[in-house]
Image (cartoon, rainbow, N blue to C red):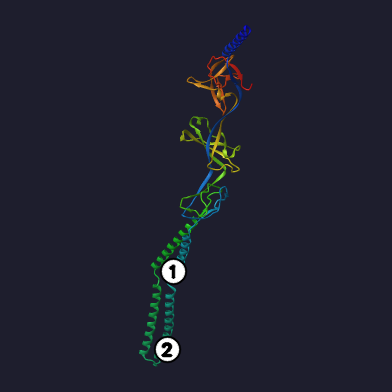
Amino acid sequence: MKKGLLTLVAVAVVVLGWGILRKTTPPSIGFTRVRRATLTSTLPTNGKVEPFEWQAMRAERAGILGRVAVRDGQTVAKGEVVATISDPSIQADIQAGEARVAESRANLAALENGGKPAELADIDSSLKQAQLQLQQEQKDAATLDRLAAKQAATAAEVEAARQKVRQSEAEIQGLEQRRKALVGKTDVAAAKARLEDAQAALDLARQRAIQGVVRAPMAGVIYGLAVRTGAYVNPGDLLADVGQLNRLRVRVYVDEPELGGVAEGQPVTITWQALAGKTWSGKVERKPASIQPLGTRQVGEVICWIDNPGHDLIPGTNVDAVIRTAVVPNALIIPKETLRRDSQGTFVLRLAEDTVERRAVTIGAASIGAVQVTQGLAEGDAVALPAEIALRPGDRVTPVMNGT
């Protein structure tokens, strides 16, 4: 009985001592050393892809797409037929216009030649007969003149013959005047005007037919094909886009506070979730000229270009972007998570023997996981990592070095 009581007392003493010791033992806290390394400062964000050079192809007139000769991703030459817009009425207008032009040309040619062929033939026939008759009458008159000189014909017969000659000459003169009067200057001018009107109508119909043939305005790759054969289109409807896809432009959205670190010529790396593991490289081409809202963010559109030799990245895609804003060799760096902030500024908890002390720091360039320290720490210093318990300057700790 006495021995059992002593055992219980001993156990109680041990438990009490362990509790007291536990309360007085400093907590184990993770620490990491300040080290020197080359720090690549990056700015991760997102963006949208568009062609570096492109043009839209739109319908110039209404109609039904009789043929779509291309597909998305197809390479085309400048001027290559992309689609045709059919309209049966246009072909009918062309045929009618050609007939009107031919008729107008024939009428003009007839007028310029003196009149209509039937009327001219009638006048020419009358002239020929009158001229033959005149020749005969002139011979008769000459014969009578010789006979009258021999007193073989009377003066009345001679005068009658001469009268017939004068009548025939008057008839020929009248026919010639009639032939000249058959076509006036105003008739020719009117015929020319009718021909010009007919030609203008024909040219318009042909131009409408040309508008029905959609050709590539530049050499490149077809993308964003929005129509198919048999679809009805209106003037201005988008058919497809064509662009140079060997090089792309990316509009990268950078939050306003981070724009100060962006400069033209900085390297940029693009990734697309649809092709995991593949990257595209380029450079910053132009900084933004203004700030604009993007959802809940205030951003500037940083214009970048990237090479796209395999055409794997397509316009219109949403991508992730990383801009390399700086490379600092031999920089003092610490993990970003060791930084702490309060109303007095940015600081870390530095290990001083077995306690932690507040150490204000000035930071410089930063990467995704690390930050450069320009003032406040030295190489080899140990700084506290985030812990489950709240640490205050002066707290005693049991340091556990990161990686050990």
Residue extending farthest to the bottom is 152
In the picture, the quarter occupied by the N terminus is top right
Look at mark 1 in the image and give the residue it sits on: 107
Question: N-terminal of the two: label 2 or label 1?
Answer: 1
Residue 136 on image: x %, y % = 43, 85
Q: Is residue 143 above or below residue 328?
A: below
Q: Amino acid at mark 1?
A: Asn
Count the numbered circles shown: 2
In the rendered image, residue 109, in percent from the top left (x then y), is placed at 45, 69
Number of residues whose C-alpha sits closer than 10 Å to that of mark 1, classed few (under 14), some (14–19) or many (20 or more): some
Label 2 belongs to which residue? 143
- At x 44%, y 61%, the residue is 201
Quadrant where the C terminus sits is: top right
Q: Position of residue 86 (x, y in %)?
A: 49, 57
Task: Say the numbered circle drawn on residue 124.
Answer: none
Q: Position of residue 75 (x, y in %)?
A: 58, 49
The answer to whether any part of residue 272 appears in the image is no
Horizontal relation, residue 174 to residue 399: left or right: left
- Distance, label 2 to label 1, CA atoms, is 48 Å
Classify residue 309 as left or right of residue 226.
Answer: right
Q: Residue farthest to the front?
A: 1
Check disc 1 and report its element: helix, strand or loop. helix
- Callout 2 amino acid: Thr
Name the residue located 40 percent from the left edge and 66 percent from the top edge: 190
Please identify the residue farthest to the left as the structure is shown: 156
